[in-house]
Amino acid sequence: MALSRRDILQLMFLAGGGAALAACGGGSSSSGSSAGGGETPRDPDDGGGSPTSPPEPARELPLRAGPLSNIGPLVDSGVDGVLIPEGFALRRVATAGRQPVSKLPLFLWHPLPDGGAVFSQSDGGWVYVSNSEFVPGGVGALRFGADGELLDAYPILVNTRINCAGGATPWGTWLSCEEVEDGLVYQCDPVGTPRQAQSHPALGRFKHEAAAVDLATSSVFMTEDEGDGRLYRFRSAGRVSAVNGVPGLDLDNGVLQVLEVEGFENGAYMEDLAGARALRRVAWVDVQSPDEPQARVRARIEDGTGQGAPGTRFKGGEGIWIQYWPEGERDTVTGFEHPLRAVVFFACKGDNRVHALDVDNDLIEVVFDNEQLISAGEDAFDDVDNLVVSPMGDVVVAEDGDAMRLMVMVPNQPARILLQVPGGGSELTGPAFTADGSRLYFSSQRGPAGLLGLPLGRTYELTVPAAFRAG
C-alpha cells in the first residue's frame, strides 16, 4: 500500500532523516537507519544498495530576487524632493489638472491617479495607462515614442466610480476596477476611446482592487479591498474578440470562485504569521449569487447560517501581478507535481503581507511581512498597496502611508527601498515597468497639482540603469 505524505514525514522523523530545506525550496536526501542503530534492512532485489528517503516537500517556493535587490542608498533626485538610488533618474510626466501635452482637444490629467500599466506599441514606443480614484473616475493614457518623448495624452474610460487598480491582459487591454460595494471591471483599449470600453459583470460585483490574467489556465485573479475580503478567480468559458479586436478570454461567460487555504475555510483568517509563511494547499470554491454584491452575500450567509461564507479571509486585498518563468527556467517545487511556471503575488494592507500563489500546484505562502523590515532596521511598512513584477523578476510594492515608499520585496528576506517621496499625506500608486525594464512609472496620488497647488496627484518616470536590468 502506498504511503501518504503524512506517513512518510512521520517515518522520516522517527528515523532521524530529512534535512531542512534551503530557502530556494530544494530538498535533500538521507539514508534511513534502523531504530537500534544496526544495518539498514534492504530489499534483496534492490541490487545491494541502501534505500533513500524521499525528499522532504518544499517549505518555500523557489523564488529568486531580481537585480533591484542590489540597489544602494537613496539620494535626492532633484525633482520634487523625491529620493532615488544613485545612478537612477527621475522626471515628472503629468500633473493632475494640467495638460500633459499642449494640443487639442484639451485633456487634463486626472485627479488621484492610482493603478496603472505599460503597453508596448509596434513603433517601439509605449502607452502608460492610469486609473482615477475619484468620482467620476475613469482612465487616462500617456503615449510615448520610442525615444521616450511624451507624444499624446487622452482618456480611454470615463464616468465610472473610484477606479482604484486593475490589470493588463496578455491580449493588450487594460482591466480597470471600481472600488465600490457593487463595483465592476471595465475592459479598455490603451490606444482606443472611452466609447470602446466595456463592463464585465461576470467578473463579480464587489470592492474590486486589482486583477491579473493567466491565459494558460483561462483565469482572471482579483483582489477585494475589504477587511473580510476574498481572493477571487474567474475561470473563463472560452475565447472571444476583445475591445481592441484581438482574441482574448471571454469575460462574460465563466465561473467566479474564491480561494480557500486548507484549514482556513469559510471566512477563517491565518492569524499565526509563522504558519502563514509555510507552504499551504489551496482549493477554489464557487461563489454564491455571483451576480450580487459579494459583501452583502457574505453577510446574508453568515446571518442565515451562523457560519462563515466560503473563502479564506484576506484583510484588505490590494495589488496583484503574475510572474512567469519560461520553459527551461522553471525550478522544481520539491514534492509537488508541477515546476514553477506562474506565481500570483498579491498584497493585503490590513496585515501588511504579500502572498505568493503557485498557480499550477495550488500552493500559497506569505513571502513578505513587516517583521522583515523591522529586522532590517527600517520602519514598518504602512499599508502595502499597488504591486508590480518587473521584467527582471523584481517584486515592487507601493505604500499607502506617510513614509511614501516603493519597496523591492526580496522573497523571505529584508526588503529594499527603491524610492521615497518625503512629506507624507499621500500614497504611492500605479507602479509599472516598460517591457525592457528601463523605465518605471508611478504616481504620488496627493502630490501638489493644478494652478492652485491642490493635492490631486503627480505622475513620474524613473529611469533604471542598465546594470539593474540584467537577470
Image (cartoon, grey):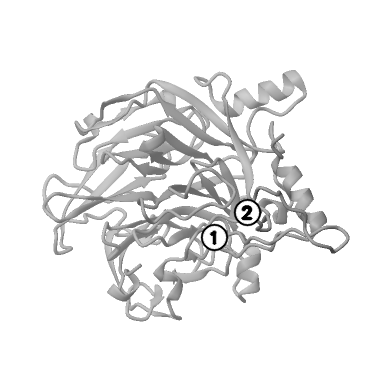
Give the amino acid type for the residue marked by disc 1 in the picture.
Gly
Residue picked out by circle 1: 401
Which residue in the rendered view is the most extreme toward the right? 36
Residue drawn 34% across the image and 24% down it? 238
- Which structural element holds mark 1? loop
Closer to the camera in the image, 172 or 8:
8
Considering only vertical position in the picture, is 375 above or below 164?
Answer: below
Picture coordinates of residue 116, whole percent (x, y): 35, 50
Q: Residues within 10 Å of mark 1 (few under 14, many from 20)?
A: some
Quarter holding the N terminus is top right
Quadrant of residue 254 in the image? top left
Quadrant of residue 282 in the image? top right
Residue 426 shows up from this direction: no
Considering only vertical position in the picture, is 250 above or below 91?
Answer: above
Residue picked out by circle 2: 47
Q: Is residue 404 left or right of residue 119?
A: right
Q: Residues within 10 Å of mark 2 (few under 14, many from 20)?
A: few
Q: Which circle's residue, 2 or 1, is located before the other in the chain?
A: 2
Measure the alpha-carbon separation of dots 2 and 1.
64 Å
Quarter holding the C terminus is bottom left
- Which structural element holds mark 2? loop
Residue drawn 27% across the image and 38% down it? 171
Residue 32 shows up from this direction: yes
Q: Is residue 232 left or right of residue 170?
A: right
Q: Is residue 400 left or right of residue 161?
A: right
